[in-house]
Image: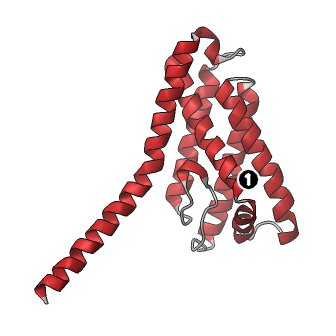
Amino acid sequence: MVELTLLLQLVLGLIFLSSAIEKLVNFTKHVVAVKSYEILPDRFARPFSRVEVAIELVSSLLLIIGMFPWISITFLVFLLVLYSYAMVFNLLKGRKEFNCGCGGIMGDHRLSWLLVLRNLIMVLILMYIYNYSTAQMVTSNFTVADIMQFFLIAGCIVLVMGTLPVLKSIRKLTNNIIKEGSKLKSS
């Protein structure tokens, strides 16, 4: 149980960290994404984004290193609920023509109910981690070699998650090329 908890903790920590880093690197783009939800007045989008990205960055780092898991998990669940609320608010109004602004390894996608479901699943995983983590670091039961193996496994999982959309795009592009080739051949 402890091994699964640590692995999930690292995977989610890396997912949130990649998202926070992308939002920092492309901060103006992220502010535009926040504005596109049309929930906050435009003048609050930039300050909100600063606080949101700071919370995501610090919480993901705390989750990865296993310190104060209840704080990091509480803040990450709060962010996921906030993001989901914004998505549901816009989906119910029929507004889904803009990108979610998630960023990182999870990518940016058009708003959909699947994104809300994904966020719910991530909340459930965070609750699982919270339930099975101890008051001290979950990593305290492992050697340095064990922790390095978990980081390697978590990194591979996150890498695979990041490459799946690329592989899907390559598949779509290949299918289009084959279709065009078939049309040219039959002409």
The image quadrant of residue 166 is: bottom left
Dot 1: few (<14), some (14–19), or many (≥20) neighbours within 10 Å? some
- Residue drawn at (71%, 55%), measured in percent from left and top? 25
Q: Residue at x 51, y 23 (%)?
A: 150
Residue 97 position within the rendered picture, expressed as x and y whole percent measured from the top left:
57, 74
Q: Residue at x 88, y 69 (%)?
A: 43
Residue 89 located left or right of residue 171: right
Give the left or right position of residue 120, taking residue 33 as reference: left
SS assignment at label 1: helix
Q: Considering depth in this image, is 26 or 2 the residue closer to the camera?
A: 26
Classify residue 90 by image quadrant: bottom right
- Looking at the image, which residue sits at the far left? 186
51 vs 89: above or below: above
Between residues 128 and 25, which one lies in front from this camera angle? 25
Q: Is residue 127 above or below residue 47?
A: above
User: Furthest residue to the bottom?
Assistant: 187
**69 horizontally vs 54: left or right:** left
Say if residue 1 shows up in the picture.
no
Task: Give the quadrant of the C terminus.
Answer: bottom left
Whole-percent x and y of residue 167?
A: 37, 55
Question: Where is residue 116 drawn, in percent x and y?
Answer: 56, 54
Indicate the amino acid at tag 1.
Leu
Residue 179 position by quadrant: bottom left
Q: In this view, does 177 lie above or below 7?
A: below
Per the image, the residue denoted by label 1 is 24
Q: Where is residue 13 in the image (x, y as percent from the top left)?
A: 62, 35
